[in-house]
Amino acid sequence: MWPVAAQAGPPEVDRFDNVEQIMLAGFSDVAFTTGWIPAGSPVQLSIDVQAANTLGLSMFGEAHYDWDSETLSFEGDPGGGNFAYDVGLLLHAEVKIDVIGFSWTSDLLGPYDLLVEDEAEFDPYLLPGNADRPVVVGEKTEGVTVASVPLLPDIVIASGNLDIDVSFDVEASVEGKSIAVTGPLNEASVITEGESVSVIPDEVEDWMEPLEVEAQLLARVTTSTTVIIRPHLVVSVLGTDYDIAGIDIPVPLPEYDDDFVFDPVLLQFDRPEPPAGTGESGSDSDGSGSGEDSGTAGEGESGETGDAGIDGRLDDGCACSQGDGRPPLSALVFGLGLFGWRRRRSKRD
């Protein structure tokens, strides 16, 4: 069994990258129609609305494991965080005129689309103590003209124009809450930026087997979305003007106020190399033990080493050297094996 820690050097590093996207509502999820409004009016309009909103959040950085203190910490890449919030609208409209002696219904007008989006970069992981915490994105306007459509059902009898404005107040915020850590022997939670927590390593048979730790980032995200459609229809029919305005059509987009849970990330850290001469049993480091027989043969007793001067071999086939200060051949082979197998196993780029 290899020691838990030996000859520890600089902290071992692995990537701790987190990417998550949530579609709060797709265009197929939020779809409704106003029907013909105002009810009973000789001039009416109908508006069909589809809406969608999406959250995107990414935080990139590194995990550092210090073998001397047996602690784990996290450091975000400068500018390695991105938070984006998008709201999209698709609008269709129709106009219907039914005045004595004249009836007309327009073809479907549109689609007219509006995309409200904002994003921000920051330094992860937005835990308490992070100067960028919280990150807020959003946009607000009292009115954006999505469409202005002339209506010419009959240039002599009727004419008009349809304007569609959209007002919106879109805002989203994010802040980190914690990084849950699960090691082989204990659990811990990082709750402040740059904090180091204890992660007790396990003992393994093969020191080249990496220490594996699972880490999961938790953030808090809130959104507030207000979207209102305001149509304005002006039509003149047979010398009579019809003005339809002051109608607010709210768009029921879902809001979000919940924990944003990223997928767990498996971290792997190389173990320190054991001290030179340490074997699996730990009994050869002082040169005693199994070397007793070869030491006896080196003294030339019983005359059994007479052929060793020719090819360096003992009668029993042992490739041991006779007191010349060189290690036994078996030790050289073992050492070469370690040299050839030293690597960062299972390490992700």
Image (cartoon, grey):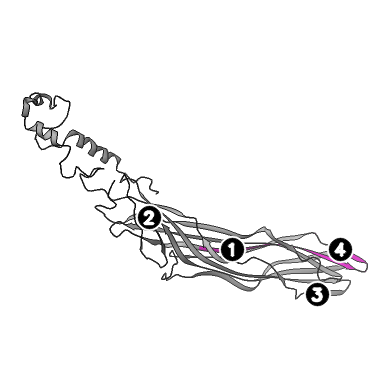
Say above or below: 188 vs 171. above
Q: Nearer the viewer, mark 1 or mark 3?
A: 1
Reading the image, the residue beneath label 1 is 86
**Most common SS among magenta residues:** strand
Q: Neighbour class for label 3 at 10 Å: few (<14), some, many (≥20)? A: few
Residue that badge 2 annotates? 185
309 lies left or right of 238: left
| Circle 1 SS class | strand
Q: Nearer the viewer, mark 2 or mark 3?
A: 2
User: For the residue marked with disc 2, what is the amino acid?
Assistant: Leu
**SS label for mark 2:** loop
Q: Name above or below for residue 250 compared with residue 212.
A: below
Q: Quick check: marks 3 and 4 in contact, CB under 8 Å?
A: no
Which x, y percent locates residue 7? Answer: 24, 52
Residue 104's disc number: 4
* Residue 170, disc: none
Q: Earlier in the sequence, mark 4 or mark 1?
A: 1
Q: Image check: 219 left or right of 292?
A: right
Label 3 SS: strand
Question: Label 2 crowding class (10 Å Cα cut-off): few <14, some 14-19, many 20+?
Answer: few
Q: Amino acid at mark 1?
A: Asp
The stretch in magenta equals 83-107
Distance from label 1 to label 3 (Cα)?
A: 34 Å
Relative to the observer, which residue lies in front, 112 or 202? Answer: 202
Q: The residue under label 3 is which amino acid type?
A: Asp
User: What percent of the width, then of the height, locates residue 175?
Assistant: 49, 68
